[in-house]
Image (cartoon, helix red, strand yellow):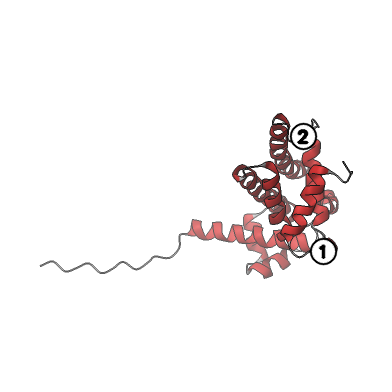
Amino acid sequence: MPEKSAKRMPGRPKQADMNISIHQAIISTASALFKEYGYESVSLQQIGRRCGVSKQTIYYHFASKPELFKVAMTTMLQNILAVTSQMLDEADHLEHGLVRLAEVILANPHAEIETMMREAEPFLETEQILAIREAEQHIHELLAVHFRLAMDQQFLREEDPMFLAETFSTLMLMGNRENVLNKYESPLILGQKLITLFLRGAKVT
C-alpha cells in the first residue's frame, strides 16, 4: 500500500506578492501622512519609519517624493471615485445616494485637496499635476452624469451638471472640517443637512 504523501506546508510568499504589499503599504502610509501634515512637512524617512521600510526601499518603488505624492493622491481620488460610483449606482433615488455618499465621506475625514496641491505644486512636474487633476476630474464627471440624469427625470432644474458636481464636492469639504463635524451627532445627520441644503437651497418656497 503506497504511503500517503506528506501534507505540503505553505510556501513562503512570492516575492512579487511581497513587493505589491510593500508598494501598497507605502502608498497608504504616505497618503495618511500627507493628509495630516501636508507635503513639505513629510519626509521619506518619516514614511519609511511609519510603514517599517527603509528610505532605499521607498526609492525602489518610487523615483522621488513628488512621484510618491502623485501616486498617493491619485490612489485616494480613485478610491473616492469607486465609492461615489457604488453609492449612486446602488441608490433607488439620487437624494438617497447623495446622503449615503455624504455619510461615507464625512465619516472618513480627508484633507482639502486644493490646500495640499498649493503646497506641493512647486515641487511637482507638469505630468504629475495633470495626473492628479485628471483623477479629480473623473469624480466630477461621474457626479455630473448622475445630475444630468436627474435633470432629464425632472428631479433637478436645468443647470450645468459639472457646476453642480464641483459645488457638491466643495460642500463636502466644508462639512469635513472638525469644527463643523463636532456640532452634529453623526456624519449621517450632517450629511442629510448638507444634501438638503444642496438640493433645495436656503430660500423659503
Q: Tell me which numbered mark, 2 or 1, is placed earlier along the sequence.
A: 2
Residue that numbered label 1 is attached to: 178
Callout 1: few (<14), some (14-19), or many (20+) C-alpha neighbours within 10 Å? few
Q: Amino acid at mark 2?
A: Pro
Task: State the SS at label 2.
Answer: helix
User: Label 2: how many residues lie within 10 Å, few (<14), some (14-19) or many (20+)?
Assistant: many
Where does label 2 land, which residue? 161
Split into 4 quadrants, where in the image is the N terminus?
bottom left
Residue 24's spot in the image, x, y percent?
Answer: 60, 58
- Residue 144's place in the image compared with 4, above or below, is above
In the rendered image, residue 34, in percent from the top left (x then y), is placed at: 76, 60
Q: Amino acid at mark 1?
A: Glu
Residue found at x 70% / y 56%: 103
Q: Position of residue 170 (x, y in %)?
A: 82, 48
Does residue 124 appear in the picture of this structure? no
Q: Residue furthest right?
A: 203
Residue 62 appearing in the image: yes
Secondary structure under the numbered disc 1 in the rendered image: helix
